[in-house]
Image: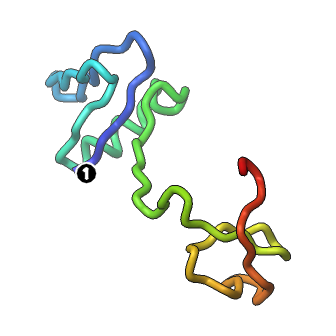
Amino acid sequence: MTTLSVAPGCVGVELPNGKKIDADKNGKVIVDDPKVERFALKSGVGQMGAIARTTYNYSSAPGGTRVCTGCSFRGFAWQDTCPRCECEMTEPTEGK
């Protein structure tokens, strides 16, 4: 299942077979079929940027991050060395 975002003012997506999928009040369209998703993203309005795949990130926790001194990678609070460049990880100082 994929969630697509439509441009402000759009009310949904029309498929090549004539079926219409309405967007919710936040401009999100839930698509179950991968063929429909590919068609929507490769259509004319998809190429113009009016339709985009919505992604969600569940990996961040507020207040529990550390920053690499070498490459500025943001990691978890329990990491002492950077997994990318092996430099030291320190507590972020901005916003304190």
Q: Residue at x 70, y 87 (%)?
A: 81
Rendered position, 64 above or below 54: below
**Quarter of the image where one finds residue 3:** top left
Rendered position, 92 above or below 36: below
Q: Is residue 33 left or right of residue 71?
A: left
Q: Secondary structure at mark 1?
A: helix
Q: Residue at x 55, y 26 (%)?
A: 48
Name which residue type carries label 1: Pro
Rendered position, 86 above or below 90: below
Q: Residue furthest top?
A: 9
Q: Residue at x 38, y 32 (%)?
A: 5
Q: Position of residue 41 (x, y in %)?
A: 41, 39
Q: Nearer the viewer, residue 76 or 56?
A: 76
The colour style of the image is rainbow
Q: Position of residue 82 (x, y in %)?
A: 70, 83
Q: Position of residue 96 (x, y in %)?
A: 72, 51
Q: Nearer the viewer, residue 40 or 81?
A: 81
Q: What residue sits right under mark 1 in the picture? A: 34
Q: Is residue 39 left or right of residue 31?
A: right
Rendered position, 36 above or below 51: below
